[in-house]
Every structure is written in C-alpha cells, then in structure tokens.
Amino acid sequence: MAGDEMAEVIRYEEVCISYRNVPVVRNLSFALEEGEILGIVGESGSGKSTLIKAPMGLLGREGEVTGGRILFGNVNLPELKEEEVRKYCGSKIGMVFQNAGASFHPIRTIREQLYEAVREHEAVSLAEFEERAEEMLRKFSFDDTKRILDAYPFELSGGMQQRVALASAMLLKPRLLMADEPTSALDVTVQKQVMEEMLLAREEMGTSILLVTHNIGLVRRMADKVLVLKDGECVEYGRTEDILNHPQAEYTRKLLDSVPRLRRKGQD
Ligand code: ADP
Ligand code: MG
C-alpha cells in the first residue's frame, strides 16, 4: 500500500558491511516506520555501531558497504559521497553517540556550535536561532538556557553535554535519530532523563529512533521493536514484548539473563 510505504523512514535491505574485506554485518534487513523506536541489542563487537555509521558515510577508510541497500526515501545512502550525505540528510537524520561531549569543540561556546550546526542547513538569524535553541533546551529540562548557550563544553557535566547534544540534534527536527549507546556513560538519574527526552522528541516531532544499547531495561521501556544482532547477523526481530518475554534464540536468552540477575542480586 502506498500509504504504508510513505510512512517508512529508513530501510536496510540485505546489507553487508566489511572492514578490510572482513565481513562484520551480513545480510541485515529491517525497516523503521515514522515515529517508531527500534532497539538494537547484541554483545560487544556484534556490529551495532557499524550498522549505524554506514548510512552516514562514517565507516572510515577501511569500512565498506559491500552489498544491499540502505534506503532513505528512495535514495540508497551508501552510494552518496560524504558531502552529499551531509547535504542530503544531515538535517533529516540526527545522531548522538555515547560521549557526545567529545564531539564539541573545546574552546567554542555551545551557542556558537549549535548555531553553526543549524546554519549549515537553514538560513536563520542569530535571534531566531536563540529563540529556537532556548525553547528546545527548555523542553530538555534545562532552566537556565542562556547560561547553557554561553557555556564552554568543559563547564558542563558529561550528562549535561549529552543532553545538549541530543537537544542540538533535535533542533533540526530530524525524521530519524540514530543513537549509539546514548546513555551508557551516564549515571542512572541522567540516563532516565535522557530516555524521557528521547521519548518526548518522538512524541512531539514524530521522530523515529534507532536506539543501539546494551541496556535491556532501556529497550524495554522505549522500543516498539527489537532487533537482536549476533556476529553481524539478525537472530531475532520483532515486537519488544514478544522478543523480551518470549525470546526464541538461546543467544537472546543469555543476553536477557545477564542483566536482571545481576540487578536482583544487588537489590535483594
Ligand atoms: P558493536 O558496536 O556492536 O560493539 P562494532 O560495530 O563496533 O560493534 O564492531 C563490529 C566488528 O567490526 C568488531 O569485530 C570490530 O572489531 C570490527 N571493527 C569495527 N571498526 C573497525 C575498523 N575501523 N577496522 C576494522 N575492524 C573494525
Ligand atoms: Mg558500538
């Protein structure tokens, strides 16, 4: 149906990715619909970051998409040059990484950096930008928004940097947010805050989210669907409650087991 196709934001079709001709992602297929949150889980080294970097041309010199397609609309993203990717979908696809603070320039204010990021895609005046940035920061639970814009990255805590990075990605109202372990370096309280902010982004802007994490609790609370990755291959893909409550693969069971047992031991 045409209506269904239009609601699809990104589609991976039998995607294969190698580093120096060593395959690390094999025949991976999934799609994300508008407003959908897909959690991608799998042990370390299973290819989670690789599959998130691929569409944006961030695999580095050694990485290559060797097969399949990653369709955004009807454009196959790996076919574009890095510059074209940025132009084509830099405003439509937002990204947040684990230590987002590290990607801020150390001696330029948050205002300068956010303004530059927005101006790369839109002709906005500084005043317009400030209004929008402050509104977004307020949504993301910052009260003293002027102070945040005036700040240098080192004046903010890691958790604040992460939340500013998320707000910054959302300033362009992307259709898709790709988040790679966005809360893994944060303490539990800030983790919860970031999670709620991502959910808010979905609710208010209909943003789809590709959420890579090893935090099963986060997946349970946020994701509509889950894809379980092992050695670059999909072992299970389906609705979150089905996968988490009735895992079919032994690998998934182990992955799920490793978390709650530890937590129960610590709490009881
Ligand atoms: P995950 O995010 O699930 O931990 P990655 O996508 O980072 O996994 O890595 C998948 C596999 O690709 C791993 O075996 C890793 O060692 C390998 N890999 C990642 N980046 C590179 C690279 N630049 N060069 C060679 N191998 C890489
Ligand atoms: Mg990773």
Image: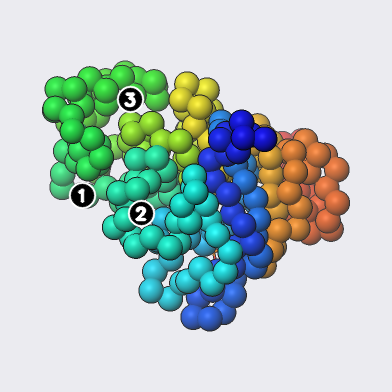
Q: Residues within 10 Å of mark 1 (few under 14, many from 20)?
A: few
Q: Is mark 3 within 8 Å of ligand 2?
A: no
Find disc 2 in the rendering and name its residue: 85
Q: Earlier in the sequence, mark 2 or mark 3?
A: 2
* C-alpha span from label 2 to label 3: 27 Å
Find disc 1 in the rendering and name its residue: 106
In the structure shown, which secondary structural element does the residue marked by tag 3 occupy? helix
Q: Nearer the viewer, mark 1 or mark 3?
A: 3
Where does the N terminus fall, quadrant-wise? top right
* Labels 1 & 3 near each other (Cβ < 8 A): no
Name which residue lies at 39% across and 69% down.
60
Please tell me whether residue 18 is drawn above or below residue 212 in the rendered image: below
Q: Farthest residue in the bottom direction? A: 21
Q: How is the image coloured?
A: rainbow
Where does the C terminus fall, quadrant-wise? top right
Find disc 3 in the rendering and name its residue: 137
Q: Position of residue 229 (x, y in %)?
A: 68, 58
Q: Residues within 10 Å of mark 3 (few under 14, many from 20)?
A: many
* C-alpha span from label 2 to label 1: 26 Å
In the structure shown, which secondary structural element does the residue marked by tag 1 occupy? loop
Q: Residues within 10 Å of mark 2 (few under 14, many from 20)?
A: some
Q: Nearer the viewer, mark 2 or mark 3?
A: 2
Please tell me whether residue 209 is drawn above or below residue 200 in the rendered image: below
Q: Position of residue 107 (x, y in %)?
A: 15, 47
Name which residue lies at 35% across and 48% down.
88
Q: Earlier in the sequence, mark 1 or mark 3?
A: 1
